[in-house]
Image (cartoon, coloured by chain):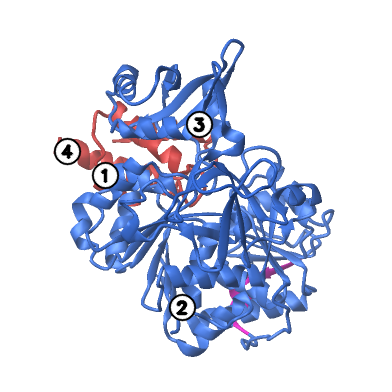
Amino acid sequence: MSEMREQVRAYIVDNFLFGDDNGLEDSTSFLESGMIDSTGILEVISYLEEQFAIKVHDDELIPENLDSVGNIVGFLGTKMAAA
Amino acid sequence: MSSISHQTLIHQFLEESARALPDKCAMVHGKERISYENLNREANRIARWLMDHGVAPGDRVALMLENCREYLSGYYGILKAGGVAVPLNPDLKPDGLAPLLSRITPRGIISSAKCERVLREIDMPALSIPALLMARPRLKWSDIPLTVGSFGEIAATGDGRNPDLPLDETSLASIIFTSGSTGQPKGVMLSHRNIVANTNSIVQYLELTSADIQMVVLPFFYVMGKSLLNTHVAVGGTVVINNTFAYPASVVQQMIDEEVTGFSGVPSTYAYLLHRSPLRSVRDRLTSLRYCSQAGGHLASHTKVDLIKALPEHTKLYVMYGATEASARLTYVEPHRLHEKIDSIGIPIPGVTMKVVGENGEELPQGETGELVAEGTNIMQGYWHDPESTAKALSAHGYHTGDLGYLDRDGYFFVVGRRDNQLKVGGHRVNPQEIEDALIDTDLIMECAVLGIEDALAGHRLVAVAVPIAGETTERDILQRCSQTLPRHKLPSEIRFVKALPKNSSGKIDRAACKKLVH
């Protein structure tokens, strides 16, 4: 789990924060903080689908699954357990 | 409430709804709800604070906020103080913000924690901005020589009566910067009269009443978002703010939970709703959804047909056309004629007249293509401090939209493309919109932009930037299908696949940014 967290976090920091992870908590909302916009969210989804071999369904596109590092890790945990 | 109002000033819509329906819910945002009486009271307190801090009729006040409760009370508060509301994109960076502020020289700024860091980087004393009203501030402001008020405290206490300033209906109410694709943004000047007239027309053709509940995913700083606010406040309806359209499933769920009656979007909103949301599987639960409306650019007819199929049977689709310069709206397609006029932008809304004008300013007969020119009480006063652009856009004929189109024998208008967006490809004149429609028609593409890349031999080479619906789609699949409908010279020489198209802040495709992806 912690490896997954680090992987997701590193992806967000590299791709959206230009390598500066200052202020990125596990609970920081991507949208509210303005860190990632709606186009960026789609990139995050594509990354998750490729990297973790999952399929994010349309009805799973909710902030509770995807809007922070913590939410993503929780969501990945559920998806992989169900796989 | 009656659908046609006698108000002459924008904020009188709010005052009338607060008087007639004091306990009615004006706004929902997450768990927060506010009644008309409380919203009006908050706006009055904001107005009085602004007046106490030197805002006089005609003074500009910048509104740099995401969609939220403070946006509503701040917007109406500025208008009640006689000020000119200048909505700005809260995602602006200092480089983009500073030049706009120096152009509008505001007496104050209303903003929130989201913009604090950017505002701290702006030299406000140098720009002679004396007052700042902050919602939910996180930083300390005491080291900066300007008055900083806490929005929450000011809105909660003090005299909440309407200030009732004597204002003329022709006085300037708002300056809205257009998201033009070239050059610096232009500040569209709209008077109270412009916006009131357009609000009344929209209320009339959408048949809005106090029973209407609107899901708002478009920003209020964009003219279409702003018209959603004005029209619903005018009828005493409710706006449901949801700033998380990036997660469409959560928006659809809230539409069910709040029994939303209206949803509005630009073309990309509907592309996402169709292809990246559970709309189809939950349509039976959208029992209250009376209508959807679309504006903000051309939506391929194929997408319109898919959308009608995906929406509940009782939901009407209003296809509309407008411009910031028209306070928002110019034409609409009556829903019962949509199938028959699927590619049309419709008929003029009440109070607007439109005609097709040729190169020399002459009115063209039915069927001939020229520039669409509109007249009405809703047409802007001009561009802020820009007489040259104003003279180009406004003539004795009215407002020149920059769109090329024609009129059919039933009085319906059709847009064929932007005047400045026509491409020359190997001697042929090509309209990118036609090719974009053909790409969408393949059923393989979610959204796309067709660009003309300068080419020494052909003039332009056509390159499509496209988002495929399924990951395994190939360029060959698409071209094969397009070749059945398009002549060879209109087939893109290249299709570049991307995960999402770059958009500007109002969700419209950013063609300049798309071009950078290709180069």
- First in sequence: mark 2 vs mark 3: 2
* Colour of the chain lettered A: red
Q: Position of residue B315 (x, y in %)?
A: 28, 61
Q: Nearer the viewer, residue B49 or B5?
A: B5
Q: Amino acid at mark 3?
A: Asn
For the residue carrying disc 2, how many other residues have a C-alpha within 10 Å: few (<14), some (14-19), or many (20+)? many
Circle 3 SS class: loop
Q: Are marks 1 and 2 in contact (CB under 8 Å)?
A: no
Residue located beneath label 2 in the image: B235
Q: Nearer the viewer, residue B406 or A12?
A: B406
Q: Amino acid at mark 4?
A: Ala
Q: Is B187 above or below relative to B473?
A: below
Q: Residue at x 75, y 55 (%)?
A: B384
- First in sequence: mark 1 vs mark 4: 1
Asked if marks 1 and 4 fall on the same chain, the answer is yes
Q: Is B337 above or below relative to B203?
A: above
Asked if marks 3 and 1 fall on the same chain, the answer is no
Q: CA distance from mark 2 to mark 4?
A: 50 Å
Magenta stretch holds residue B370: no
Quarter of the image for the N terminus of chain B: give it: bottom left
Q: Amino acid at mark 1?
A: Asp
Residue located beneath label 4 in the image: A81
Q: Are marks 1 and 4 in contact (CB under 8 Å)?
A: no
**Which residue range is magenta in the image?**
B147-157
Residue located beneath label 1 in the image: A58
